[in-house]
């Protein structure tokens, strides 16, 4: 960021400008107002509910879920795919846009990275919650076959979480040094955390050089890892012969779908933080306008993949595929399918072409629609295929013909979303959600002022 | 409403008419075929041969004979043990079996004349009041050429060049051991699941010999061995008489377990090399980079 040409500020002007930025961005970290308390209570409630439901599931086994012989992957796996999808946005913003030198991402990148870390972490846990015997999770490593996409999936989920965490922490280092100095009365544990995470930052040129180098290396590294994480997730399905999963474009189809839902998740977070943290001067209409255009771009790519994914088999109507396609288009899954297509894809493309919709309010509502649509989309990717097996479902209990998630299953799923949001909420309280030092640098404040 | 009723009545009438028509359909046999009889007398031997054929060709529609379990077709095939069959002459049965009609296929192209008569011979064993036309023997006795001695045994000769097996069956009769004539011998090769019959049942000649040529391309074990089993088919008469021998006539066949070599479907110790290299190569490279970054972070404090 040092090579930006900005007007030369005097020492005093720089100090005043930096103080305002630092205060604006640090103040929300120390405030715990009524709305935050209500939010925290909602999160607490979801975690409590989760704890109870998960206790029942571990005690009684997976029989308490709606899963059975045919629908052996239910809401949990759909939720897992959704989590991985949301997590992918970290790579899109930090790496793809960051490496290409796009400037408007400065206040957005850390929000995206927080979402990525939170959702990637919980994605790994969601798989464990899908196990009837979670104590056997290590068997995947002890007895796992390198040939199995499930082993690849666990590997990339962990790797992506690690890199995302580093990409979140690295740019935080200079901010930690700033926060430490400006909040001398913070609780002791927070002081310690900031102390550790500031890693002795003093703002020397060598430190700047080192941190930029590390970020650049990781930003490059995370691109293939992120592509891998969602491609491998798609291979869990596409490496079978089943109707609706047996598709050659599942990898890119999943990756582009992930970008759509991830960008929408960032828009929601931007809107909420802008409101609750009072960041109107930092997350401006300009930023919303930019990310709206990004959403249109990724949605158009996703739309293109959807046409390929559905129109090609629908044109051929191979036996077996025909059942699947008809069930999605006009059958028992049509409601969810068209909800996902319209709210998750078509509506944002059409509406965001108009300038008046590229404003925080309308975008927030649209983004919620996109995220809900994205969740529904994962659900209809995972389930209908299993209920349309190659051999007819016969001589089984009536209940095996359908899949209905049960109470504990829904509570656990909501609980995982609560967990991810809890992590985002905590991160947004211990770290400034917008990088102070980068924002100040872009505002023309010199490094000496920033680090004093 | 009225029209509806009329329709229903019409429908019923049509159905009943068809049913009667089916029943009324007579299967007339030309006069010249009516009195035809088998040139050889029926015997236990012919009936036994007929039984095998019946089970292979006729049972699927006519059901297990004597159990009234024929298929509910129209017209009904019927159980050959029943009156519908016992009242017909040998000639009628032979004509119908040969030519067929409607759902009943003609067997003249599938079964030889002798085989067709054997089937009829078998059916006749279920007809209590059957009197052989022209007094041409009895199905209650073994045919003249059927051996009725005891203590049968099989001596076997292997022609290693032509892969010919000749079974010499001998038995005791009137205190002497003599060649057993007219005994059915089966030749089998032992396979993983069950026995592979070679050449069908062969009846011994006047010298008590039955011969079969074995194919040259049978798969054997890894050195081309397989087990031959030769036995008398009519165990109910002669008891279990069997001869076993291992011969080296087969082709070498080495079973390759697909799990024994490296493949995507193999177990974890048999993962393909390229996959191991790719997987661990990528994982190690990526994690070394991560470790490098963490080490750089540790050194950040002293970066100059």
Image: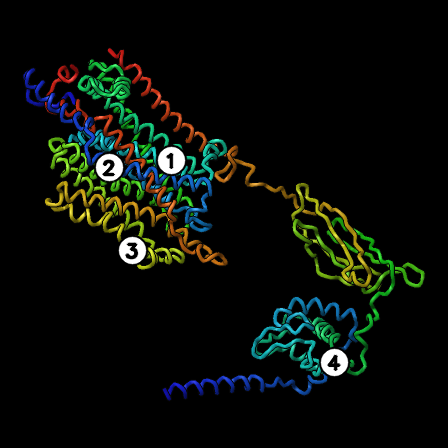
Query: In front of the other: label 4 or label 3?
Result: 3
User: Which label sits on residue A218?
Assistant: none
Image spot of residue A299 (x, y percent): 22, 44
Instruction: Identify the residue at horizontal 65%, vertical 86% (top origin).
Output: B30
Q: Nearer the viewer, residue A218 or B49?
A: A218
Label 2: which secondary element: helix
Q: Are marks 2 and 4 on the same chain?
A: no
> Relative to A294, is B157 on the left or the right?
right
Q: Residue furthest right?
A: B175
Instruction: Identify the residue at horizontal 58%, vertical 75% (top origin).
Output: B72
* Measured Cα–Cα span from mark 3 to mark 1: 30 Å
Label 3: which secondary element: helix
Q: Are marks 1 and 2 on the same chain?
A: yes
* Parent chain of label 4: B
* Measured Cα–Cα span from mark 2 to mark 4: 101 Å
* Measured Cα–Cα span from mark 3 to mark 2: 31 Å
User: Which label sits on residue B37?
Assistant: 4
State the residue position of label 1.
Answer: A125
State the residue position of label 2.
Answer: A39
Q: Is residue B75 among what the camera can see?
A: yes
* Measured Cα–Cα span from mark 1 to mark 2: 23 Å
* Parent chain of label 2: A
**3 and 1 marks in contact (CB < 8 Å):** no
């Amino acid at each position: 960021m040092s090579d930006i040409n900005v007007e030369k500020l005097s020492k005093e002007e720089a100090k005043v400008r930096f103080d305002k930025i630092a205060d604006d961005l640090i103040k929300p970290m120390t405030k715990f107002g009524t709305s935050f308390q209500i939010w925290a209570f909602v999160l607490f409630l979801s975690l409590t509910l989760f704890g109870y439901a998960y206790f029942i599931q571990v005690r009684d086994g997976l029989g308490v879920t709606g899963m059975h012989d045919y629908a052996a992957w239910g809401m949990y796996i759909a939720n897992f795919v959704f989590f991985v999808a949301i997590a992918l946005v970290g790579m899109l913003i930090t790496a793809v846009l960051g490496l290409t030198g796009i400037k408007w991402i400065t206040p957005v990148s850390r929000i995206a990275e927080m979402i990525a870390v939170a959702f990637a972490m919980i994605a790994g846990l969601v798989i464990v919650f899908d196990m009837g015997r979670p104590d056997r999770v290590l068997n995947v490593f002890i007895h796992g076959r390198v040939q199995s996409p499930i082993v690849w999936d666990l590997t990339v989920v962990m790797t992506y979480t690690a890199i995302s965490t580093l990409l979140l922490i690295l740019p935080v280092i200079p901010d930690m040094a700033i926060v430490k100095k400006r909040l001398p009365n913070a609780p002791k544990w927070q002081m310690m955390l900031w102390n550790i995470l500031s890693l002795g930052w003093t703002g020397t040129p060598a430190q700047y050089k080192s941190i930029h180098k590390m970020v650049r290396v990781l930003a490059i590294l995370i691109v293939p890892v992120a592509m891998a994480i969602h491609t491998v997730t798609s291979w869990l399905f596409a490496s079978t012969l089943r109707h609706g999963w047996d598709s050659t474009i599942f990898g890119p189809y999943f990756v582009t779908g992930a970008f759509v839902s991830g960008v929408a998740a960032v828009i929601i977070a931007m809107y909420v933080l802008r409101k609750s943290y009072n960041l109107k001067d930092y997350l401006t209409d300009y930023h919303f306008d930019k990310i709206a255009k990004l959403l249109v771009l990724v949605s158009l790519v996703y739309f293109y993949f959807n046409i390929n994914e559905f129109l090609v088999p629908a044109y051929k109507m191979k036996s077996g595929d025909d059942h699947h396609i008809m069930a999605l288009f006009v059958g028992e899954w049509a409601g969810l399918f068209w909800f996902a297509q319209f709210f998750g894809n078509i509506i944002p493309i059409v509406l965001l072409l108009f300038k008046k919709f590229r404003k925080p309010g309308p975008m927030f509502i649209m983004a919620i629609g996109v995220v809900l649509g994205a969740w529904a989309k994962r659900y209809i990717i995972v389930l209908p295929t299993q209920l349309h097996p190659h051999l007819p479902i016969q001589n089984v209990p009536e209940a095996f013909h359908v899949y209905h998630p049960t109470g504990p299953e829904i509570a656990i799923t909501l609980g995982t979303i609560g967990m991810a949001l809890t992590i985002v909420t905590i991160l947004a309280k211990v770290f400034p959600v917008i990088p102070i030092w980068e924002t100040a640098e872009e505002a023309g404040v010199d490094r000496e002022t920033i680090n004093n | 409403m009225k029209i509806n009723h009329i329709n229903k009545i019409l429908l019923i009438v049509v159905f009943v008419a068809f049913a009667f028509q089916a029943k009324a359909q007579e299967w007339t046999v030309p006069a010249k075929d009516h009195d035809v009889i088998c040139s050889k007398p029926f015997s236990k031997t012919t009936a036994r041969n007929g039984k095998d054929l019946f089970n292979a060709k006729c049972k699927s529609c006519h059901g297990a004979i004597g159990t009234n379990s024929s298929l509910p077709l129209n017209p009904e095939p019927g159980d050959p043990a029943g009156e519908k069959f016992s009242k017909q002459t040998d000639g009628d049965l032979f004509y119908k079996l040969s030519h067929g009609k409607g759902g009943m296929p003609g067997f003249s192209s599938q079964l030889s004349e002798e085989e067709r008569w054997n089937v009829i011979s078998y059916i006749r064993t279920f007809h209590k009041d059957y009197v052989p036309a022209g007094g041409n023997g009895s199905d209650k006795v073994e045919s003249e050429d059927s051996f009725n001695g005891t203590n049968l045994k099989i001596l076997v000769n292997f022609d290693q060049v032509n892969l010919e097996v000749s079974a010499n069956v001998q038995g005791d009769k009137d205190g002497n051991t003599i060649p057993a004539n007219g005994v059915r011998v089966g030749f089998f090769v032992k396979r993983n699941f069950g026995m592979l019959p070679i050449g069908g049942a062969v009846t011994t000649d006047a010298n008590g010999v039955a011969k079969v040529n074995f194919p040259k391309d049978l798969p054997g074990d890894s050195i081309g061995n397989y087990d031959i089993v030769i036995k008398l088919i009519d165990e109910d008469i002669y008891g279990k008489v069997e001869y076993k021998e291992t011969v080296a006539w087969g082709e070498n066949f080495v079973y390759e377990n697909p799990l024994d070599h490296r493949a995507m479907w193999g177990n974890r110790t048999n993962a393909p090399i390229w996959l191991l290299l790719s997987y661990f190569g990528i994982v190690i490279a990526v994690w070394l980079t991560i470790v490098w970054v963490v080490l750089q972070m540790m050194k950040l404090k002293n970066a100059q």
